[in-house]
Amino acid sequence: MDPVTMAAGSALVAAMATDAWKQARDGVVALWRRVHPERAEQVGGELETLRTQVLQARRAQDPDTEQALEGMWRLHLQTLLQRDPQVAGELRRLLDNQLAPTLNPGERERVYSVIQNTAVYGGTSYVAGRDIRPEPPAPKA
């Protein structure tokens, strides 16, 4: 799954529990309106339901439900991206300009955490989230 899609799905669900949830909702509906206008109003209704579900999950201290909702919206956004790959830039702008700014710093950091997969053939690779001090390779005997 595309990392931006994953981040946007997480940010959307988290934003639904903030005072700026309407801004998040309007941004997602506007994206759908540009790409699939026939579904925009339906998506708006689904986002209203999402907000209710997120607030209930938070009141019940139920992170599993919130995580499931994130997964569901990640799939919605991924499907949108698969149908129209040109949406990737718009989705990134939505994430950066409307969803992420509504979140507290801890949630924003969680949303922007990146999953990396690395494949190395015939060499050495170092992947780190912070400082790295690699040991030089041992001499070949």
Image (tube, rainbow, N blue to C red):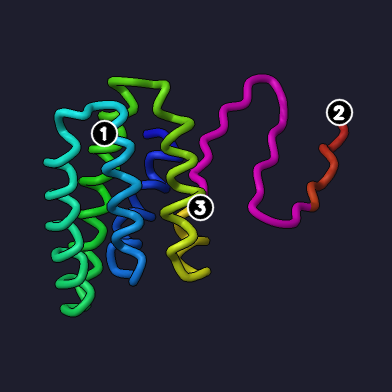
> Which residues are the magenta region?
113-132
Badge 3 vs badge 2, beta-carbon distance below 8 Å: no
Quadrant where the N terminus sits is top left
- Quadrant for the C terminus in the image: top right
Badge 2 crowding class, 10 Å Cα cut-off, few under 14, some 14 to 19, many 20 or more, is: few
The residue identified by callout 2 is 141
**What's the residue type where badge 1 is placed?**
Arg
- How far apart marks 2 and 1 lie (CA) works out to 65 Å
What residue is shown at x 34% (from left), y 55% (from top)?
A: 24
Identity of the residue drawn at 26% across and 43% down: 29
Q: Report how far apart the C-alphas of labels 1 and 3 lie in the structure.
A: 26 Å
Mark 1 touching mark 3, by CB under 8 A?
no
Q: Where is residue 75 drawn, in percent x and y? A: 25, 38
Instruction: Indicate which disc, 3 or 2, sits on the residue closer to the N terminus.
Output: 3
Give the camera-side residue of 105 and 91: 91
Question: Which labelled disc corresponds to residue 15?
Answer: none
Closer to the N terminus: mark 2 or mark 1? 1
Above or below 93: residue 121:
above
User: In this image, 64 relative to 24: left or right?
Assistant: left
Cα–Cα span, label 3 and label 2: 44 Å
Residue hosting label 3: 112
115 magenta-colored? yes
In the figure, residue 13 lies in which quadrant? bottom left
Q: Secondary structure at mark 3?
A: helix
Label 2: element kind: loop
**Horizontal relation, residue 48 to residue 19: left or right:** left
Q: Secondary structure of the magenta portion, mostly?
A: loop
* Residue 29 horizontal side relative to residue 52, left or right: right
Give the residue at mark 1: 33
What amino acid type is highlighted by mark number 2? Answer: Ala
